[in-house]
Amino acid sequence: MSDPLLELSQQGVSIWLDDISRERLRSGNLKELVDKKHVVGVTSNPTIFQKALEKGDAYDEQVRDLALGKTDVDQAVRFLMAYDIRWGCDVLRPTYDRTDGLDGRVSIEVDPRLAHDSDRTTAEAKSLWWLVDRPNALIKIPATQEGLPSITKSTAAGISVNVTLIFGLGRYDAVMDAYLTGLEQAKDAGIDLSTIRSVASFFVSRVDSEVDKRLDKIGSDDAKALRGKAAIANARLAYERYEKVIASDRWKALADAGANVQRPLWASTGVKDPTYDDTMYVVELVAPDTVNTMPEATLDAVADHGQIRGNTIAGTYDQSRKVLADLEALGIGYDDVIDVLEQEGVQKFEDSYAQLAESVQHQLDATGK
């Protein structure tokens, strides 16, 4: 029998699960996915935690203890998330050890309400790093303009960072520069660069959702022909930017000092349009030194019927540029699409965090009575 997930791994794609919950951890499901479905990492976000907290009784005991300790809601949210992340890190620790720190990573996100405050984001990143206290954790920092200095400062402090909410190529260039600057500062401070890891989470499906909506409004044959093409083209061009950076003299000097590359991570890879192949954001973005973090439904779809065709990014750059040029010719401005997606992305996580905090406060109040 074929094993598409194994084939994907053999192509240099690390398979991460875009989900975590206390129930998944205590049932042994995460370990089962590691053992049987080649999962080598986990990502989380406020939406994932908000949904997890509302299901079952897995968090009840810790919430009761936090209520008895008169813990305020923001701190309670941190403690609840950190507990799951530490547990996840421990489950993935053998993978971390086996891959010399490349994989076995579990991500926790800074409070998204701080996305436009550099200093507070940096302070929150340090606080979460201390709180989780696992070498295989990754601290997620949003790739807003204000997040860029936090990426540099956190990296310079020796913190491993997952840069999240990247949509556009220009911002991705700035993210890579922020990481390299952080490594250079860490090197000057005498920090062992080999201990620092990073991924840059480039969001995929949301690009098609926004672009397709605009194409549908145009409604022409040319517009219809471009549906479902923008996101993959955008991600492929991001990989081209990555290749240029790791070929640069600046990167080679850091690599000689023991630094690790900041791998591109394909996020938001669950297909939102049911007319599309449910594995397209996986099988069309296969290349070495990448990560694909998948919702469990996408993971199962790839395992069941994914067609892994080797490297599907190499040789596609001219074609990908043409897709973006054709969209511009139809009046769909790239920069405007990216601006909308970044604003919506931050807002969605802020809203989820607010719902998470409201749910925790409700449970604290109910338990404390």
Image (tube, rainbow, N blue to C red):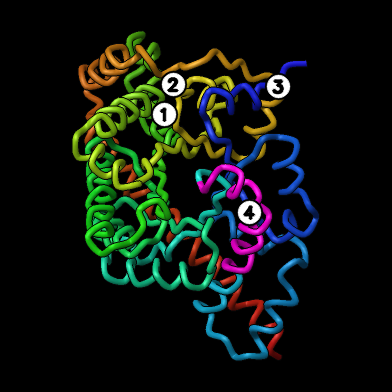
Amino acid marked by disc 4: Arg
> Is 243 situated above or below 112?
above
Q: Considering depth in this image, is 68 or 339 the residue closer to the camera?
A: 68
| Alpha carbons under labels 1 and 2: distance apart | 6 Å
Q: Nearer the viewer, residue 273 or 346?
A: 346
Which residue in the protein does label 1 denote?
208
Examine the structure image and report whether residue 100 is included in the region drawn in magenta.
yes
Pointer 2 local density, CA inside 10 Å: few below 14, some 14–19, many at least 20: many
* Helix, strand or loop for disc 3: loop
The kind of residue on which mark 1 rests is Asp
For this rendering, which residue is in front, 145 or 54? Answer: 145
Task: Identify the residue at image location x=70%, y=61%.
Answer: 22
Question: Split into 4 quadrants, where in the image is the C terminus?
Answer: bottom right
Label 4 packing within 10 angstroms: few (<14), some (14-19), many (20+): many
Between label 3 and label 2, give the one nearer the viewer: 3
Q: Tell me the CA gap for discs 3 and 2.
A: 26 Å
Q: Of tags 4 and 3, which is closer to the observer?
A: 4
Q: Is residue 163 magenta?
A: no
Q: Of the residues shown, which amino acid type is indicated by label 3?
A: Asp
Question: Given contact means CB atoms under 8 Å apart, are the residues at marks 1 and 3 in contact?
Answer: no
Per the model, the C-alpha gap separating discs 1 and 3 is 28 Å
- Residue at position x 48%, y 20% from top? 284
- The residue that mark 4 highlights is 93
Q: Position of residue 142 (x, y in %)?
A: 36, 54
Which residue is under mark 3?
Answer: 3
Task: Say few, some or many: other residues with alpha carbon within 10 Å of mark 3 (under 14 / 14 to 19 / 20 or more).
Answer: some
| Image mark for residue 228 | 2
Span highlighted in magenta in the image: 81-101
**Distance CA(mark 4)–CA(mark 3):** 24 Å
